[in-house]
């Protein structure tokens, strides 16, 4: 058996043929090279599986069973089948900056008390236009300051020791918001952090109201169930209030319509340096991938 890599990257994909090549190209150009990439196809009906199998790199493993089990189950499967000491998340429609793995690995090694680390991200849409930046706080206290409202730690930027993910699997009863519920379940016993630099380019288009409310309901149900189980009734009540207000805001923004403005409020403006980093990222994967900005 080949030597186990330091980092395993789990990338469940479903009908991602239009974006997968760029996402994988951003992993292939990482300045840290001792990794494996698990492409787990969730029963795609487009060319995703064929594309996944076309990458000629021995560090890429493709897993497919022809079934559609959903993201949450595939995330747990990715952890179970990974071989690295560390496990990183990645979506098939996002892009990783070249230093992502090395920066997050360095942070975890320098801070052995931290279980899970994320990082900053620029936000772009399907036209590859920048929409802003998520500059998430570094400390565990800041990330967990308002657990009823959610945790500012971007799911596709998650990285931690594989043993932590094995001890804390995703709740497969939740098709959405599984990351926030995982953080809610572990915030009292684990420590989180965000590196204070760009590690990810996060694709975000405005979802329809139905999809958005589905996610909100999963988050509300998952957080309340978690906080009641941990005897945090005050948190549960605040969760009910916070998520209900967000659902009302979603409805108003959709009817007016103000969804674009609502999304913009979630990010901070990008700097000139951020724009240069974004352009450099696109240039570096151009030729390998079909991303154009």
Image (cartoon, rainbow, N blue to C red):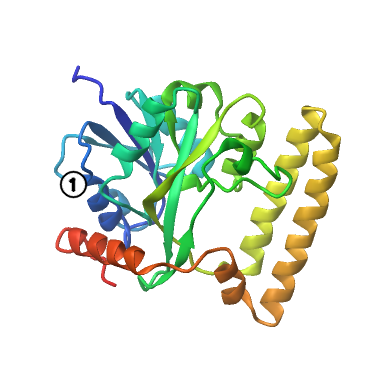
Count up the numbered dots.
1
Reply above or below: 46 against 124. Answer: above
Kindly tell me whether residue 96 is visible in this rendering.
Answer: yes
- Spot occupied by residue 112 in the image (x, y as percentages of width and height): 44, 22
**Quick one: label 1, few (<14), some, or many (20+) residues within 10 Å?**
some
Residue drawn at point x = 32 percent, y = 23 percent: 83
- Spot occupied by residue 146 in the image (x, y as percentages of width and height): 71, 45
Quadrant of res 93: bottom left
Kindly tell me whether residue 173 is visible in this rendering.
Answer: no
Residue drawn at point x = 74 percent, y = 48 percent: 220
- Spot occupied by residue 238 in the image (x, y as percentages of width and height): 82, 47
Reply above or below: 126 against 217. Answer: below
Front residue (pair 55, 177): 177
Quadrant of res 291: bottom left
Image side of residue 213 versus residue 118, left or right: right
Name the image quarter holding the N terminus.
top left
Residue drawn at point x = 50 percent, y = 45 percent: 155
Name the image quarter holding the C terminus.
bottom left
Front residue (pair 215, 43): 215
Q: Name the residue under label 1.
A: 55
- Spot occupied by residue 18 in the image (x, y as percentages of width and height): 32, 63
Front residue (pair 17, 266): 266
Image side of residue 217 versus residue 116, left or right: right
Reply above or below: 64 against 46. Answer: above
Front residue (pair 260, 76): 260
**Element type where label 1 sits in the image:** loop
* Residue that lies at the very extreme toward the bottom in this rendered image: 256
Image side of residue 251 versus residue 132, left or right: right
Reply above or below: 13 against 170. Answer: below
């Amino acid at each position: 058996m080949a030597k186990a890599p330091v980092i395993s990257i789990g990338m469940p994909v479903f009908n991602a043929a239009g974006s997968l090549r760029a996402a994988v190209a951003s992993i292939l150009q990482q300045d840290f090279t001792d990794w494996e990439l698990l492409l787990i196809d969730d029963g795609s009906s487009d060319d995703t599986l064929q594309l996944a199998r076309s990458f000629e790199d021995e560090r890429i493993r493709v897993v497919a069973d022809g079934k559609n089990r959903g993201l949450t189950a595939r995330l747990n499967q990715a952890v179970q089948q990974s071989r690295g000491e560390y496990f990183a998340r990645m979506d098939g429609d996002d892009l990783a900056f070249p230093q992502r793995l090395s920066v997050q690995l360095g942070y975890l090694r320098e801070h052995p008390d931290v279980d899970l680390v994320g990082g900053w991200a620029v936000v772009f849409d399907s036209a590859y236009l920048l929409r802003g930046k998520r500059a998430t706080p570094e400390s565990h206290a800041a990330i967990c300051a308002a657990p009823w409202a959610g945790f500012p730690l971007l799911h596709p930027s998650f990285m931690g020791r594989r043993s932590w993910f094995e001890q804390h699997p995703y709740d497969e009863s939740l098709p959405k918001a599984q990351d926030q519920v995982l953080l809610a379940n572990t915030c009292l016993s684990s420590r989180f952090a965000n590196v204070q630099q760009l590690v990810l380019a996060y694709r975000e288009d405005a979802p329809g109201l139905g999809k958005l409310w589905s996610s909100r309901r999963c988050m509300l149900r998952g957080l309340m169930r978690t906080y009641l189980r941990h005897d945090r009734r005050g948190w549960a009540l605040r969760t009910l209030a916070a998520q209900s207000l967000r659902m009302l805001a979603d409805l108003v923004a959709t009817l007016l319509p103000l969804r674009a403005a609502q999304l913009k409020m979630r990010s901070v403006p990008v700097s000139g340096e951020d724009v240069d980093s974004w352009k450099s990222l696109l240039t570096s994967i151009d030729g390998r991938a079909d991303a154009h900005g």
